[in-house]
Image: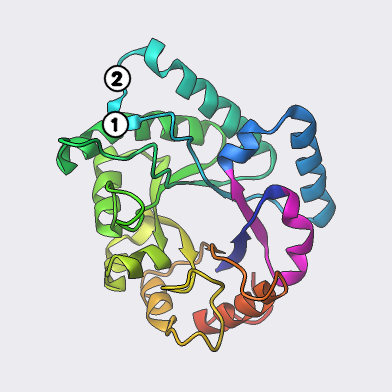
Amino acid sequence: MKWGACAPVLSAGWMRTSGCAYIETGFLGVAQLEAARFAEAVEVLEGCGLRAEAMNGFLPGEFQLLQMDFGSRTQTAPLRAFLQKGFARAERVGCTVVAFGSAKARRRPEGMTREESFARLLPFLRLAGDLALAHGMRLAVEPLRSAECNTLNTVAEGLALVRAAAHPGVAVLADMYHMCENGEDFSVLRQADALLHHCHIGCPGTRKYPMPADGYDYKPFFAALQSIGYTGRISVEAGQINGPEDLGISIAYLRGLSGAEPGLQ
C-alpha cells in the first residue's frame, strides 16, 4: 500500500519527513489558483520530491449535477471548461485519481428519489470519466456520511453506481471514517475487487489522525482490503491532534497495522 495525506498543495514541503509517498490535495483549489500561484505549487512539489497523486474537493457547489441537462452543451459548458482546466493542471502535478465527494454539487433536491438521482449522475460520470482518462487518471466515487450528503452514502451504493456507469475511467473510493459513521460493514469491500481504486482513513468519531492510543481497532478495515489484494493508495484524511509532527506517528502506526514493511511506501 502507498501512504499519503490530505493537505493544501503548498504544504507539501513538511510532508515528506512524515513518511508520505504522495500528497492528496484539492482539485477545486488547484483549478482556481492564479497562474503564478499554480507555478509556485508546482515548484513546491518538485522541490520536496512529492507528487499530488490524488485529489479531493472536486466540484464547487454551484454545479448542481442533479439538476443539469447533460444533453445541452450550452448548459454544461461552464462545467466542461472547469473540468478541462482542472484535469490539465492535475495531470501537471502527477495526479492519478480524483475523489468525487462534492456533497453540495450532488445533493438531491426535495422530491427527487434516490433512484432518479443515481440515473442523473450517470451522464456526469461518463463525461468526467472521459476527461479523467484523457489526462491519465480515474475518477473515484466517494460515498459520504449521511450527515454531509443525502446522495451516495455507502460503498455498496457507490459500487452499484460505478457498475451502472460501466466506464473505465470511473471507480469507487472507500473512506473508513464515512463507512463507520454510516454503520457500513467493511465486508462490503470484498465485493469491490478491482473497482476499488482509492481509500481514505481517519479516526471514527473524532476525524483526527489515527493514533496508537485512540481506542479504535483499525485491523478489520485492513483485513478487508487484504482479502481483495488491495495494494493502492491510502490517504490520511483527518485533522491534526497536537501538530503536523503527529502525521509521521500516524502513518507509521497504520503501516504496521496494514502489514506493510516499515520501509514500504
| Residue span colored magenta | 10-26
Crowding at dot 1, Cα within 10 Å, few <14 / some 14-19 / many 20+, comes out as: many
CB contact under 8 Å: marks 2 and 1: no
Residue shown at the point (43%, 40%) measured from the top left: 169
Side (left or right) of 107 relative to 245: left
Indicate whether residue 247 is drawn in magenta. Answer: no
Q: Position of residue 48 (x, y in %)?
A: 81, 56
Q: Position of residue 250 (x, y in %)?
A: 61, 77
How is the model colour-coded?
A: rainbow
In percent of the image, x 30 and y 16: which residue is there? 71
Q: Residue at x 36, y 74 (%)?
A: 224
Q: Amino acid at mark 2?
A: Asp
> Residue 103 versus residue 97: which sits nearer the camera?
103
Q: Nearer the viewer, residue 41 or 34?
A: 34
Asked if residue 248 lies left or right of residue 193, the reply is: right
Q: What residue would you read off at disc 1? A: 66
Residue at mark 2: 69
Q: For the point 21% across and 34% down, which residue is it?
A: 119
Q: Please state the total of marks drawn on the protein image.
A: 2
Label 2: how many residues lie within 10 Å, few (<14), some (14-19) or many (20+)? some
The quadrant the C terminus occupies is: bottom right
Please determine whether, in this image, residue 6 is positioned above or below residue 92.
Answer: below
Image quarter hosting the N terminus: bottom right
How far across and down, in percent of the image, does residue 163 sit?
A: 26, 46
